[in-house]
């Protein structure tokens, strides 16, 4: 098999965190708690250091740093599903819509499965990111078509 390990998440900067979290939870995703600052472990003795691969209280040395205030949203178990990491707006800056390079197809979040009753087959986030729900056969077919076109 030539597939790489799956992505843990795709990071998306949003202009309003509350509206973005509300939108994605309405689509059936579960939201985690906002990321807080990471703290060093209190006990940095030899036994503590030998039992962990990190000096931090939470996470490990292989987990990427996450911005304070970011929120993970996703379907199912984060260990086996790719989710979204919603990044808060940068202070004093309004995110510019940058949904794809000119002349290229618009980036789209594709969710495998039926849309929840409160949603249509294609939805747009408050910042304009399209979310398209597809059944598994249609998703697999689109991957094959994209691979053949490349």
Image (tube, helix red, strand yellow):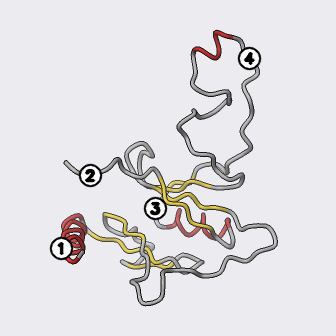
Nearer to me, 80 or 25: 80
| Residue holding disc 4 | 43
The answer to whether residue 60 is left or right of residue 46 is: left
Sooner in the amino-acid sequence: mark 1 or mark 3? 3
Residue drawn at x 41%, y 49% is 76
**Residue under circle 1?**
148
User: Looking at the picture, how far across and down is residue 16, in whole percent?
Assistant: 69, 71
Which mark lies nearer to you, 4 or 3?
4
Q: Which quadrant holds residue 144?
A: bottom left
Mark 1 nearby-residue class (10 Å; few <14, some 14–19, many ≥20): few
Above or below, 95 relative to 111:
below
Distance from the alpha carbon under mark 4 to that under mark 2 = 40 Å
Q: Which residue is under mark 3?
A: 28
Q: Estimate the spatial distance between the alpha carbons at disc 4 and disc 1, rounded to whole Å.
A: 55 Å
Q: Are marks 4 and 1 in contact (CB under 8 Å)?
A: no
Secondary structure type for disc 3:
loop
Could you tell me how many numbered marks the image carries? 4
Element type where label 2 sits in the image:
loop
Residue 60 x/y as whole percent: 57, 32
Q: Residue furthest top?
A: 47
**Sequence-first disc among 4 and 1:** 4
Q: CA distance from mark 1 to mark 3?
A: 32 Å
Disc 4 and disc 2 in contact, CB within 8 angstroms: no
CB under 8 Å between callouts 4 and 3? no
Identify the residue at image location x=42%, y=42%.
Answer: 79
For label 2, count other residues whose C-alpha is less than 10 Å away and answer few (under 14), some (14-19) or many (20+).
few
Give SS at disc 1. Answer: helix
Could you tell me which residue is drawn at 62 percent across and 67 percent down? Answer: 13
Instruction: Single out the residue that lies furthest toward the right.
Output: 92
- Of callouts 1 and 2, the N-terminal one: 2
């Amino acid at each position: 098999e030539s597939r790489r390990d799956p992505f843990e998440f795709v990071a998306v900067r949003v202009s309003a965190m509350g509206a973005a979290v509300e939108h994605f939870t309405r689509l059936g995703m579960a939201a985690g708690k906002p990321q807080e600052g990471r703290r060093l472990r209190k006990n940095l003795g030899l036994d503590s250091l030998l039992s962990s691969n990190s000096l931090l209280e939470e996470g490990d040395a292989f987990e990427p740093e996450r911005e304070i205030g970011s929120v993970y949203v996703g379907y199912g178990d984060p260990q086996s599903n790719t989710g979204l990491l919603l990044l808060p707006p940068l202070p004093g800056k309004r995110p510019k819509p940058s949904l794809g390079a000119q002349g290229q197809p618009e980036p789209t979040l594709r969710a495998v499965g039926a849309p929840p009753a409160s949603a249509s087959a294609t939805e747009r986030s408050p910042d304009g990111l399209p979310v398209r729900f597809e059944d598994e056969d249609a998703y697999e077919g689109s991957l094959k078509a994209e691979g053949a076109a490349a």
